[in-house]
Amino acid sequence: MRLTPVSVTSASPSGGTVSIVMRNITSSWAALLVNTLISFALAPVVVNTLGSVYYGIWTLLMQFTGYLWLFDFGVRESVIKYVAQYHASGERAKLETTVRTATTVYAIVTVVALAVVVGITALLPYVFNVPVEAIST
């Protein structure tokens, strides 16, 4: 069996790439706009359903969980890069070390985050003046 080379034509950087970039930018902005509109429409419904005290607690917890992505420390991007690199080059030992290190970092971050959540849970009623009837034991 004989293999023959195939000519590959590259896309014009000015035409194809620009349209892809513009499409990605437009879709990102559209998603942001839709999320904003949903938030504005949903807020009065949630406030009326939960009441102002429970809505405040819900909002506080949602803000806290929104900041949890900061605890990633760029590990996800590093794992993606190095796993692909070591897999492609056949360096199995380095690949396993990368995955093991990422798992260890995530385990440590999880334990720290759980400790913070327990601390916040204990202090939440006192710091934010939550009414006694809104606290369940």
Image (tube, rainbow, N blue to C red):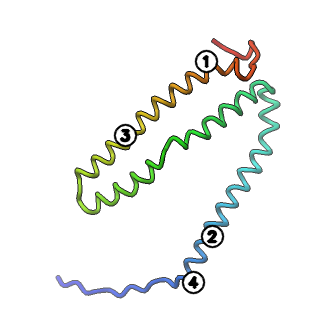
C-alpha gap between disc 1 and disc 4? 57 Å
For the point 78% across and 39% down, which residue is it?
Answer: 43
Disc on the earlier residue, 1 or 2: 2
Query: What amino acid type should be assigned to the residue bearing mark 2?
Result: Arg
Q: How many marks?
A: 4
Q: Residue 14 carries which label?
A: 4
C-alpha gap between disc 3 and disc 1? 29 Å
Disc on the earlier residue, 2 or 3: 2
Asked if disc 1 and disc 4 are in contact, CB closer than 8 Å, the reply is: no
Asked which quadrant contains residue 39, the reply is: top right
In the rendered structure, the answer to whether residue 34 lies left or right of residue 12 reads right
Disc on the earlier residue, 1 or 4: 4
Discs 2/3, front: 3
Q: Residue 23 carries which label?
A: 2
Q: Which of 135 and 34 is in front in this view?
A: 135
Q: Name the residue under label 1.
A: 122
